[in-house]
Image: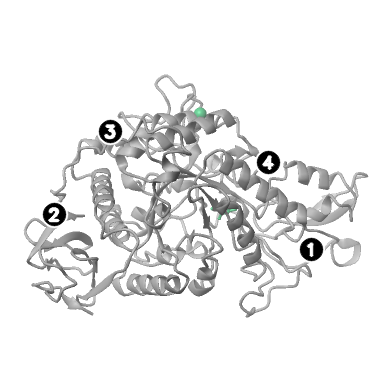
Amino acid sequence: MTDGVLEGTTSTGSTAGTGGWSQSLFAADDQWWRSAVIYQVYVRSFADGNGDGIGDLAGVRTRLQYLADLGVDAIWFTPWYLSPLADGGYDVADYRAIDPAFGSLGEAERLISEASTFGIRTIVDIVPNHVSDQHAWFQAALASEPGSPERARFWFRPGRGEDGNEMPNGWLSKFSGPAWTRTRNSDGTPGEWYLHLFSPEQPDLNWNHPDVRAEHEAILEFWFDRGVAGVRIDSAALLIKDPALPEIPAAPKPGQHPNTDRDELHEIYRRWRAVADSYPGTRILVGEIWIPDTERCAMYLRPDELHTAFNFDFLGRAWDAASMKASIDTTLAAHAPVGAPATWVLSNHDVTRPVTRYGQEDSSFAFATKRAGTPTDLDLGRRRARAAALLCAALPGSLYIYQGDELGLEEVQDLPPEQLQDPMYFRSAGSDPGRDGCRVPLPWAGTDSPFGFSPAGAMSEPWLPQPSHWAELTVETQERDPNSMLSLYRSMLRIRRSDPDLGDGHLEWRSSGPDVLAFARGERFICITNFSPVPIELPSGCLLLLASADASDGFLRSDASAWLRSEHSLTQGRGLRGPIEGGE
Ligand code: GLC
Ligand code: CA
């Protein structure tokens, strides 16, 4: 098959040599985040510099040119701090240290500065809801008595029932099982319980405690001082708990759920915004706000709170025109009143890779329905993932790309059980396959594992095994193929960067029949996605800029998207000719 990639595939090169981060990048454009393309690096699985089979900062430093050629504006690094890795680094033992498996603080500083010479900003991940059980505060709390100031920074409670054998309340962990673990007293007798909304190695902090607030503001300053352009805030809607720790009501009032999306959170983020705004350039706050109500979600994006939040509603939608259009409309409508740009996210390190998802009969995503062994048509999934990439990149706002999606990697669903690491798998006793399948180390080059992930002659295998057929999906292979997923992503991001109609702004739907989504951006840009089982005719009077499948005969195939440039201004009354007509 020859895909209709009309753009050439030469690299964009870099803007190296512009000097230190603070002078160049931050002065460049204070609105950068409204249209930014942000690439998520899951450090453990991106590139291994020292050959121990674990991705690291040295590895990332050797791949900055790759990211510049791809055309990204910023990298979001998943947690790189000192951590026992009970939850892939989302269990932080020290926010001011880099885990030795990844490198050192000095190396992180060099990486931030080097990235900026490529025109790439750095976003770090802050995990405020909880710390590692190895964090000094939690260790001190365990070593202290019930009622002590050390314990007040967490949620320690006596158990219920005779002997305190029952948990303080019935809350469940997001990773399955109870959200409470019982401690032992120094004399070996059973002691108090502590709360963990995730794994027992991730005790929840008490955000009503002034130490917790002050410490996190200091952590923000620590990283802003080192030149980071923003922070991604993990589990941002969970920080505040009702101190009475009541059971979860069947239908909690908005803002009054005992542990999610509580109204008091907003004052925390207003403080954080003041910290971010006290720095030169625009330092952004990006919330991981995984709540179903898009209007509640948008409340975090009021002008004095967070800059943006991940749009998980869209990520959860099935490959279906009406459902995706509904999500786009709801998202844009919720963002408009607060003046914040939307974000478009197809995947991340927590969810099933789009190639796999879109190749399944039920292509929606929800943790609760995630199952291994679902029949998957990867060719179909890959076609749709290509189409979805163009659709998302054309929508108004900023764009997130999870590492490996630009290579069209699928979820690895047959990892040997003894190599799985995700607590989601273990705590659900295997009923949830966990998230390791989207965290397999990237294939860069060569015909055999480790596919250039580790340097030649490395002593250790990659920490998760790579499928042998990834030989066809390496960066090296895809760079040579103008029709590869990587070439599509590069062309897409190059057009997106140079076309003023794309990024932040508005969209206008064009009427297009039930199984087609078509919309215009600005004066002349049009994106069309065909969800129907049959090809559709592209409108005349348009230049085909890029397509996810061959459209050179003027027809857009099933499960494909095309980007077009109208010869006539779309805003001055001369609509399109052909099947996609006028405004809605
Ligand atoms: C977020 C992270 C996820 C982690 C959890 C607990 O959802 O994305 O990877 O397990 O928070 O920190
Ligand atoms: Ca390594």
> Label 3: few (<14), some or many (≥20) within 10 Å?
some
Q: Secondary structure at mark 3?
A: helix
Which is more N-terminal, label 1 or label 3? 1
Dot in front, 3 or 4:
4
Residue 185 x %, y %: 89, 48
In this rendering, does residue 137 appear at all? yes
Q: Secondary structure at mark 2?
A: loop
138 left or right, relative to 223? right
CA–CA distance in space, label 3 to label 4: 37 Å
Numbered label attached to residue 550: 2
Q: Residue furthest top?
A: 457
Q: Residue at coordinates 64% horizontally, 59% vertically from top-left?
A: 271
Q: Secondary structure at mark 1?
A: loop
Three-letter residue code for mark 1? Met
Q: Residue at coordinates 45% horizontally, 22% vertically from top-left?
A: 458
Numbered label attached to residue 476: 3
Which is more N-terminal, label 4 or label 3? 4
CA–CA distance in space, label 4 to label 2: 50 Å
| Residue nearer the viewer, 263 or 504 | 504
> Label 1: few (<14), some or many (≥20) within 10 Å?
many
Q: Say above or below: 584 vs 276.
A: below
Coloring applied to the structure: one colour
Residue placed under numbered mark 1 in the picture: 167
CA–CA distance in space, label 3 to label 1: 54 Å
| Residue nearer the viewer, 16 or 320 | 16
61 left or right, relative to 184? left
Three-letter residue code for mark 2? Asp
Q: Say above or below: 456 vs 72.
A: above
CA–CA distance in space, label 2 to label 3: 23 Å
Residue 409 x %, y %: 35, 46
Which is more N-terminal, label 2 or label 4? 4
